[in-house]
Each structure stands twice: as structure tokens, then as C-alpha cells.
């Protein structure tokens, strides 16, 4: 009989920003601490891991506030992009026909806002039917700063239904290339902070053409971009996230 090996040590789960916890809940900010639900403790089912314990307000530290506010800004940008899509192309199915996107900017006062919204020139149908290898259903982002002192913190753009992963690899001029560019631009304006740049992808989950599934936002940065290339989806961001007061 062989002796059982010692149990494997598992690293603590660190959840940043407004991203879904392992138990399926999004973090909530309250007066008594980060992650405490004002309605009381969230019931834990048998076999379910509880939320990571914490008593730190994410808005009390510039580092954690950055993630909190960036996630909130991405959520707000996705809502604005949905309204933009409906106003520009009212006969299309929101994000299921073409890509939309905007750049996220960190302002001197610490707030994070999105820049001008853009829509892709071609629909997914047009790109797939062209067959020329050049007609692509991509959105060209507007990188114009919204004011003096604005620094890129990332980008947000949409994909067709079920498209929660960024396209390309770290050396290609696709979504991963946009992330690289964002990191380089942030580093040039704020040395030492380039790795904080991130890329948000929003898409509807699978439903049907007539009835779209729920909207989901995923996020990618220097820590999980290689995992994304390997096909692993990034953390899910709360689509109703709110910024620090």
C-alpha cells in the first residue's frame, strides 16, 4: 500500500475589481467593508466555497480603486455602446451584427471615462461573405484623448454572440495587439504603469437570433493574456458595476 501524497497547496483566490466570485456573486461595496452584502450573508450551498474574506474598502486605496473604477467604466461604456448601436443601426441586433468600441481613459481626478464610440464598417455577415481576406468585421477605435492629462487605461469593444475571448496573439494587430498598444501608450505617459492597461470584451451569451442571451463582459490584462490565447476566458465583470463615490 502506497502512502498518499501530501495535499496540494492551492494559492489564495484574489478577486480584483468588480468581478464575479467563485460562488457566482459579484462583489458589493458597503459601509462596513468590501464584499459584505447589506442584505446579510449570502447563503452557501453544500460543497460551495464561500467568498474570499476581506474587510478592505476597494475605494480606500488608489491601486484597488483603479480596478473598481475601470470595471465600472467598462460596464457603463457597454450600456452606452448598446444605445449607440440601437441609434445608428436600429434594424440590427445590437452587438450581434457588427463590432462597437471605445477607449477608456483615466482622468487627472482619478475618474475613468470612455472616449468617442465607434462602429465597425462591415457586419459579420458582410465579412464572412466577401471571401477576399481583407473585408473584416472590426471596429477602428478613436484614440483621441478626452482632455488634458488623460491617460489610457484600456479599451472596451463588442463581439458577436458567444465571443468572450480576445482575437489574435500578443504579436498580431488584433485584440491582443490593441492590448499591447494600450500598455505601451500608458507606459509612455505614466512610466511603470503599463501593465495596468486592460481590454474588455462584451458579447451576448447564446440564446437565439430573436431572443438574445444575457450580456457578459470579460476582462484581460498582462496577467491573463496568455491564458486567453490558450482559450481560457477572463474574469466576468459586473455589468451593473458602479464607480467609487
Image (spheres, grey):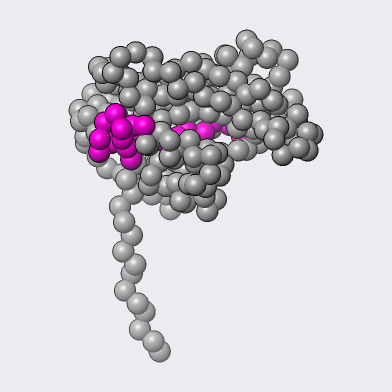
Please determine whether, in this image, residue 199 is positioned above or below residue 9.
above
**Image quadrant occupied by the N terminus:** bottom left
Which stretch did the figure color magenta?
185-205
Q: Is residue 171 magenta?
A: no
Residue at 39% from the left image edge and 87% from the top image edge: 2
**Nearest to the observer: residue 186 or residue 68:** 186
The part of the image, by quadrant, that contains residue 83 is top right
Residue at 56% from the left image edge and 19% from the top image edge: 118
Q: Is residue 195 visible?
A: yes
Please determine whether, in this image, residue 239 is positioned above or below residue 199.
above
The part of the image, by quadrant, that contains residue 209 is top right
Residue 237: percent from left, percent from top:
44, 33
Please determine whether, in this image, residue 126 is positioned above or below residue 85.
below
Residue 227: percent from left, percent from top:
47, 51
**Image quadrant occupied by the C terminus:** top left
Residue 103: percent from left, percent from top:
45, 24
Number of marks: 0
Residue 128: percent from left, percent from top:
75, 36
Q: Is residue 214 visible?
A: no
* Residue sticking out furthest to the top: 87
**Nearest to the observer: residue 96 or residue 24:** 96
Residue at 66% from the left image edge and 26% from the top image edge: 98
Q: Is residue 139 left or right of residue 221?
A: right
Q: Is residue 186 magenta?
A: yes
**Nearest to the observer: residue 43 or residue 176:** 176
Amino acid at each position: 500500500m502506497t502512502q498518499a501524497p501530501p495535499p496540494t497547496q492551492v494559492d489564495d483566490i484574489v478577486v480584483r475589481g468588480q468581478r464575479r466570485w467563485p460562488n457566482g456573486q459579484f462583489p458589493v461595496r458597503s459601509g462596513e467593508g468590501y464584499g459584505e452584502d447589506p442584505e446579510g450573508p449570502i447563503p452557501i450551498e453544500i460543497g460551495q466555497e464561500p467568498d474570499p474574506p476581506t474587510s478592505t474598502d476597494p475605494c480606500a486605496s488608489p491601486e484597488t480603486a483603479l480596478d473598481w473604477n475601470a470595471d465600472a467604466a467598462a460596464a457603463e461604456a457597454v450600456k452606452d455602446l448598446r444605445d449607440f448601436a440601437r441609434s445608428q443601426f436600429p434594424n440590427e441586433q445590437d452587438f450581434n451584427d457588427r463590432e462597437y468600441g471605445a477607449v477608456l481613459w483615466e482622468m487627472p481626478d482619478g475618474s475613468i471615462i470612455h472616449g468617442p464610440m465607434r462602429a465597425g464598417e462591415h457586419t459579420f455577415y458582410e465579412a464572412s461573405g466577401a471571401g477576399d481576406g481583407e473585408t473584416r468585421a472590426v471596429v477602428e477605435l478613436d484614440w483621441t484623448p478626452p482632455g488634458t492629462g488623460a491617460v489610457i487605461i484600456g479599451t472596451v469593444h463588442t463581439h458577436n454572440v458567444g465571443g468572450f475571448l480576445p482575437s489574435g496573439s500578443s504579436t498580431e494587430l488584433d485584440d491582443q495587439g490593441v492590448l499591447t498598444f494600450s500598455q505601451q501608450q500608458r507606459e509612455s505617459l505614466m512610466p511603470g504603469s503599463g501593465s495596468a492597461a486592460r481590454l474588455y470584451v462584451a458579447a451576448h451569451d447564446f440564446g437565439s437570433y430573436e431572443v438574445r442571451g444575457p450580456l457578459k463582459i470579460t476582462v484581460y490584462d498582462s496577467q491573463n493574456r496568455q491564458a486567453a490565447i490558450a482559450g481560457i476566458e477572463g474574469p466576468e465583470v459586473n455589468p451593473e458595476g458602479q464607480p467609487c463615490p
